[in-house]
Amino acid sequence: MGAGSRARFVRETPDVRRQALIEATARCLAEKGVAGTSVRAICARAGVSSGLLTHYFDGVDALILATYRDVGAKVSATLDAAVEAAGDDPRARLRACLQANFTGPILDPDLLATWIAFWSLVKSDPSIAAVHADVYGATRRQMEQLLCAAAPAMSAQQARIAAISLQALVDGLWLELCLDRSAFSPEEAQAMVADAMERSLSPLDGNDDQSSLD
């Protein structure tokens, strides 16, 4: 990056500078993994000096933590937008949330590589583990709320179990698609999660007994 580009970066606001460092960290994690994500690598990717990184963050660990939160927030925002675009029908909103996982920008091998870097730290870094729990918990709670809206007869426990089941299916299909698209297509994945959604809801149509899930 030339001197002119660097000068333009320096004139940016603090929030923009922080975000540029976060985005550079996400790229480094995707390309190099945790071991290759250093101050030098991040700053080279962002086109800034190492002093700027330490000005905004207490080292690489703090920056990786901020990056995890940022990536999780972007995924959540994408799902929220899909739900809102689906309109008012509760089933359509739930279906949209599930199926949005198989479209851009979520269905992205680079995003998978970044998540793998985060996951590699969950067992060794309590701060990363806490963010992981927050991200997963927020996704599950959103799913529970959408399920209860789509099936008012569903109890809180039934919604919890159904949300865990649907999220596990989404995660598995998403992981496989990011690794290799030869087995099935994103459209087939969307059809599979929509079918699983209907099967989760159908026993509750007409207020059928659901004691087996309690």
Image: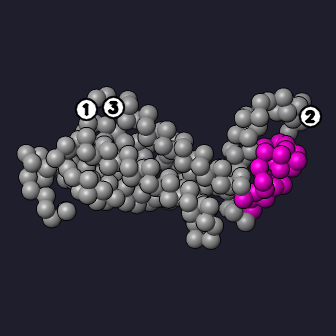
> In the orientation shown, which residue stands out farthest toward the bottom?
124
Secondary structure beneath dot 2 equals: helix
Query: Can residue 141 be seen in the rendering of this structure?
Result: yes
* Three-letter amino acid code of the residue under disc 3: Ala
> In the orientation shown, which residue stands out farthest toward the right?
3
On the image, the x and y values in percent for residue 154 come to 20, 50
Pointer 1: residues within 10 angstroms few (<14), some, or many (20+)? few
- Residue, disc 1: 89
Q: Nearer the viewer, residue 85 or 62?
A: 62
User: Which residue is drawn at the image coordinates 69% and 46% (left, top)?
Assistant: 22
Pointer 3: residues within 10 angstroms few (<14), some, or many (20+)? some
- Residue, disc 2: 3
Picture quadrant where residue 6 is located: top right
* Three-letter amino acid code of the residue under disc 2: Ala
* Three-letter amino acid code of the residue under disc 1: Asp
On the image, the x and y values in percent for residue 168 come to 37, 60
Of tags 2 and 3, the one toward the viewer is: 3
Magenta segment includes 47: yes
Could you tell which of marks 2 and 1 lies nearer the N-terminus?
2
On the image, the x and y values in percent for residue 120 come to 60, 67
- Residue, disc 3: 86
User: Which residue is drawn at the image coordinates 54% and 42% (left, top)?
Assistant: 74
